Image (cartoon, helix red, strand yellow):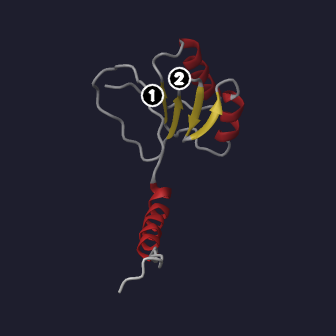
Amino acid sequence: MYDYNQKPDLNITPLVDIMLVLLAILMVTAPVIEFEEPINLPKGSASKQIQAVKKIDIVVTKNRKVLINKKRYDLENFSDNFLLFAKGKDRKTPIHIRAEKSLIYDDIMHVLKSVKEAGFYKVALITDG
């Protein structure tokens, strides 16, 4: 005969097993995920793409933040930060500058001037096209 006053036991072992598996998957995949900030590039000519083995990427976002090889700086302090970044770097290293097309011309020229003053002469403005 069944006793109606007895409380049922809740078996949470399968739930814990599933959560541990999901946690392990998350821990393995989290370091691999890279966040990239989307920017609108201006249209350019459909010339051949340059493939460089070793290059420096500079990205200027629409909120005037500069990323040098994915490390974030303010546009106002870019000149000093780039000089510190460039210490010990080969001046023949190609530099690719990508910038949001809604930025004003002066912001892009500030970045380009700072790169040129640091001694780099292989500088390219990358467009979408």
- Figure check: 10 above or below 80: below
- Please provide percent x and percent y for residue 19: 46, 67
* Residue 62 - label: 2
Mark before the other along the chain sequence, 1 or 2:
1
Q: Which mark is residue 49?
A: none
Note whether 56 is above or below 112 in the view shown: below
Q: Residue at x 34, y 19 (%)?
A: 43
Give the residue displayed 41% in from the left and 42% down from the top. 52
Furthest residue toward bottom: 1
Q: Is residue 10 left or right of residue 60?
A: left
| Up-down relation of residue 8 to residue 68 (above or below) | below
Gap in angstroms between the C-alphas marked 1 and 2: 7 Å
In-image side of 48 versus 116 (left or right): left
Q: Residue at x 48, y 57 (%)?
A: 30
**Element on which disc 1 rests:** loop
Residue in the picture at 48% in, 43% down: 35
45 or 117, nearer to the observer: 45
Three-letter code, disc 2: Lys
Q: Nearer the viewer, residue 5 or 106?
A: 5
Return the x and y of residue 24 as percentages of the image width and height: 47, 68
Give the quarter of the image for residue 18: bottom left
Of the numbered discs in the image, which one, if any, rests on residue 39?
A: 1
Residue 57: x and y in percent read 50, 37
- Label 1, residues with CA under 10 Å away: few <14, some 14-19, many ≥20: some
Q: Nearer the viewer, residue 7 or 75?
A: 7
The residue positioned farthest toward the top in the image shown: 105
Q: Amino acid at mark 1?
A: Ile
- Cβ atoms at labels 1 and 2 below 8 Å apart: yes
> Image quadrant for the C terminus?
top left
